[in-house]
Image: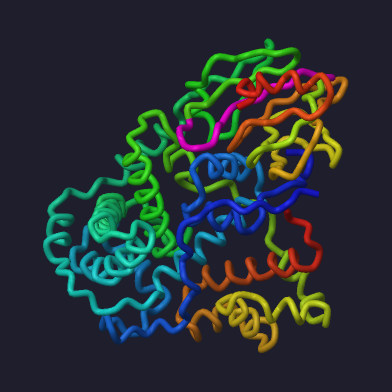
Amino acid sequence: MAHAIKFHPGMALLEQYAEGTLSADVALAVAAHIDLCPHCQRLSQDITTDLAGQLAQQRVKKDPHDWSDMLAAIMAEPAMAKAELQAEQHKAQRAAYEPIVVNQRQFMLPRALQRLASNHGKWLTLGGIATAKLPAGGEHHVSLLYIDKDTEVPQHTHLGLEMTLVLSGKIADENGEYCAGDLLINSPDDTHTPRTLANEDCLCLSVLSAPLQFKKGLTRLLNPLQQFFY
Amino acid sequence: MLKSVSVPRHDRVPQAITDTRDPMSGQENATASQWEDALTFVALQRDKAAYAELFSYFAPRLKAFGMKMFGNEQQALEMVQDTMLNVWKKAALFDASRGCASTWIFTIARNVRFDMLRKKQSRKDDISADDLWLNGEYPEPQADDEAAQWDNQLLSEKLAPHFAQLPPAQREVMEKVYLQEKSHQEVSDELGIPLGTVKSRIRLALDRLREALDGARN
C-alpha cells in the first residue's frame, strides 16, 4: 500500500482481539484492519505471543482432575500427515472469492471479510449511498457501505458505537481524511458529516451497535429511514 | 481526533508470573525450548511420551484459562480436549522456527473457544475464528530496527515516569535490556521465558511508551 495508514485500533482493542474476548463483529473490523496494516499485524502477533507466554507460565494448583482418559482418547486418534494438513490449509486460503460489485465498480475485499461478503445481502440504494448487510450475526450490525463520489452522508450522531473501516477510496469528515485501512471509531458523543471527494468514491465496512440519528434540518426527515443505515 | 471507546470484554488474562518454577505441578524450570522440542518430536515421530509431557503441562493451564473464560468446568474441559486434540492431530503444522509452542497452542485454544461460543448461539452463517485470525503468517514486514531508534529516547528523563507505569512483566524485561544492557538471549535464560516472548515484550513496551509520549494511536 503506497500510503501510510493513520488511524489504527488502540492497544486495548488489539489486546482484546488477540485474546479473543472482543465481540465478534467488532473483532471483524479489527481483523480486516489488520489485514491491511503491517504495523498492526506485527503488534497483534506480539500481543499474542505475550498472552501465550502468560498462559504457559501461569501457576496452577494441583488439579484433582484425572486427565488420563482424555489423554488416552486423544492419542487413540490418528495424527494427520503434513501434506494432508497443508493441502487443507491451502484449500481454505485459496477459496476463490469473487470481487464485490457495486455501482459497476469492482472491489477486492480483505481476507477477513471475503467469506462473509460472498454472501452479502441485497444492495439498498439511497441517493449516492448504497448499503448491503453482511451475515455476521451478533449484536452489532455489520454492512458494506458504498458512497459514490461527491456525496455527503447527512450529518448524524450515534446512539451507539460506530466503527468504519475504509476499504477502498477516500472519505473525509470534520476531523480529517481517511484512506484505505484507516479505522474510524465514533462514540455516542460524536457528530459528523462524512463526505466523499469530487473524483473518488469509497467503500467502507460499517459496524454499528445502534441506529444513527440525523441532526440537521430536513435530514431529520431521514430518521424514519435510519434502519436503512443500520 | 478519535475518541477511545470502551468495548465490553470478558475476563482479562492475568499479568505474567515470571517465575516459571512451579512446584505445585511438579514441573521445574521449563527451559525456553523444551516445548518446541517436544512438539517437534510429536510432529516428526508422533512421539507419545513427548505428547504426554506436553499434555500434562498444558492441559491444566488451558483448563484454568477455560474456567476464566467460560466460568464452568464442563466447557473448560471441552475446550481443553478440543485444543489438545488439535495439537495432536495437527502437530505436523507446527514450525519451531516461526514461533513458540505456547503461542501455537494458545491460538488454537483461543479459536476453539471462540467457535464454541458462536456455535452455542447456533448461527450457521456467522463470523468464525477462521475469518478473524489468519491461519498462517502475513508476509514479513520491513526490517525491525525500531527498537534501536528508540534507544536514545528511552534514556531521556521524559520517559522515566511512563517507564514506571509499564506492566510489570514488560518493565522487568525492559530494565534488563536497557538499564542492565543484557542481551535478549541472556534475559530469556535468566527469566526462563522464550526468546520470542522477550522480543515481543520489548516491542509492546516500546509501543506503550510511544503511545504515552505522543498519544498518536487512538
Q: Is residue A214 above or below residue A62?
A: above
| Residue A29 in picture, x, y percent from top left | 59, 40
Judge left or right: residue B205 versus residue A17: right
What's drawn in magenta, residue-wise?
Answer: A136-150
Q: Is residue B193 visible?
A: yes
| Residue A158 in picture, x, y percent from top left | 69, 37
Taking the magenta stretch, the answer to whether it contains residue A144 is yes
Q: Is residue A170 visible?
A: no
**Point 25% across, 66% down: residue:** B55
Q: Quadrant of residue B68?
A: bottom left
| Residue A203 in picture, x, y percent from top left | 69, 26
Taking the magenta stretch, the answer to whether it contains residue A196 is no
Judge left or right: residue A183 versus residue B191: right
Foreground of the two, A188 or B158: A188
Judge left or right: residue B62 versus residue B47: right
Foreground of the two, B42 or A76: A76
